Amino acid sequence: MKQTWRWFGPADLASIDDVVQAGAEGIVTALHHVPNGVVWTPEEIAKRQELVRHRKDGSPSGLEWDVIESLPVSEDIKKQKGAWREHVANYKMSLHNVAAAGIEVICYNFMPVLDWTRTALRWQLPNGGSCMRFDINDFAAFDIHILERPGAEGDYTNAITDEAARRFSALDEAGKKQLARNVTMGLPGSTESMTLDDVRSHLGEYGQISADQLRQHFVDFLSEVVPVAEDLGLRLCCHPDDPPFALLGLPRIMSTAADYSRILDAVDSPANGMTLCSGSLGARPDNDLPAIMDQFGPKVHFIHLRNVKRDTADLVGSFFEAEHLGGDTDMVALIAAITSEERRRKAEGRADWQIPMRPDHGQDILDDLNRRSQPGYPTIGRLKGLAELRGVMTALEHSQFGLR
Ligand code: DNO
């Protein structure tokens, strides 16, 4: 795997110098300042490439922009409303522009309204560090009592609605604001940051959309952009839903292996691939990550290595972000599966045999607790994750070991 690092651009609280010292070999970034649906121009792409290539003192970083995460799909495209046709045309134009700049891998997602979401951004760990957490009871408290979504109560079990009511009544005004902000305001890299009213109006426009209808909108989008990507030699790779289950009464359609099969088969092309995010998929007990890697291997174009620890074995439930080698996913088995796919590709002569990966998220530890960072993206926590993952990778990629 190629060890990459997510960098949010000039606004990032970690620097390119930090990335160099972490030993990362490439950069994952996006033009977060360009509104969704708008073309990424050659000038803006080139500006970001230049920033990636230099350290603070102007010397070369040795890094290149390897992966785009994300080229966002607008809500209009997902809903097939408003300016969606124009947004699809703009998406194709952006693909031309990134291809001309030499960037080949493009991650995106197809989650309606909310991108990735958590209920706590700095949840206290027993060792004094902190991490992100998704708590289904807190989420229900937000959905039922803060957003006041009509019919929300019917989407949860009685045990969850009771606990949600109890938690909501224990929150003061600041606590309510914080919860709403955590859920809706857009975590780093999210496609949009929304107010409660924005969320309500999007929900109204989606209406009672079914999973099949949303899937059809996705296939319509892919039928337009995948042939363009294929001609340009690009690899699109859809990120899974995070968390991988329906939220706010809307379907989520990229949460399981079966979901990926449907979408990758519907528009079958090497340019229509998967971002394998072990943390997102791993929040469901029915997702077996090494098996998913085996199943979709040739179409896995980008990898996020991260682990979560689930509270229960329920399909829809709470979890926290564990250490990279801790948690419920067997990370060593997953890396072994990735390594054998890379060996297979190499034997086949594929130019893209080496799959870019990034250590996804990190716990806030040591200096992270005193210096600010984008939630979920602390420098030291990620550096620790990368170092641990690199150890496993080095062992399994060694020519004499790790053969399955
Ligand atoms: C969270 C990330 C997501 C991801 C997008 C991909 O840390 O993995 O923000 O970038 O969902 O489109």
Image (cartoon, helix red, strand yellow):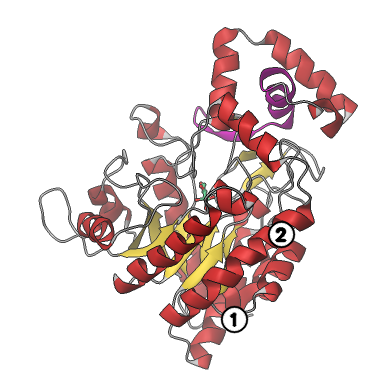
Mark 2 to mark 1 CA distance (whole Å) = 38 Å
| Residue occupying image coordinates x 37% and y 42% | 379
The residue singled out by tag 2 in the image is: 215
Say whether residue 384 is visible: yes
In the shown orientation, is residue 271 left or right of residue 3? right
Q: Residues within 10 Å of mark 1 (few under 14, many from 20)?
A: few
Residue 51, percent from left and from top: 21, 54
- Disc 1 within 8 angstroms of ligand 1 (CB): no
Residue at the spot x=75%, y=22% of the render? 144
Residue placed at 69% from the left, 31% from the top?
135
Give the residue type that dot 2 points to.
Arg
Q: Tell me where residue 139 appears, x and y as whole percent.
A: 69, 29
4 on left or right of 292: left
Answer left or right for 122 relative to 333.
left
- Residue interval drawn in magenta: 122-147
- Which residue shows up at 60% across the image and 15% down it? 176
The mark nearer the N terminus, 2 or 1, is 2
- Viewer-proximal residue, 365 or 308? 308
- Quarter of the image holding residue 41? bottom left
Secondary structure at numbered mark 2: helix
Q: Position of residue 46 (x, y in %)?
A: 23, 61
Residue type, label 1 = Leu
Q: In this orientation, which residue lies closer to the viewer: 250 or 334?
A: 250
Q: Provide the secondary structure element on which disc 1 rests.
A: loop
Residue at the spot of label 1: 403
Q: Which numbered disc covers residue 65?
A: none
Asked whether 125 or 62 is in front, the reply is: 62
Residue 301 forms part of the magenta stretch: no
Toward which corner of the image does residue 145 lie, by quadrant? top right
- Disc 2 crowd rating (10 Å Cα; few below 14, some 14-19, many 20+) is many
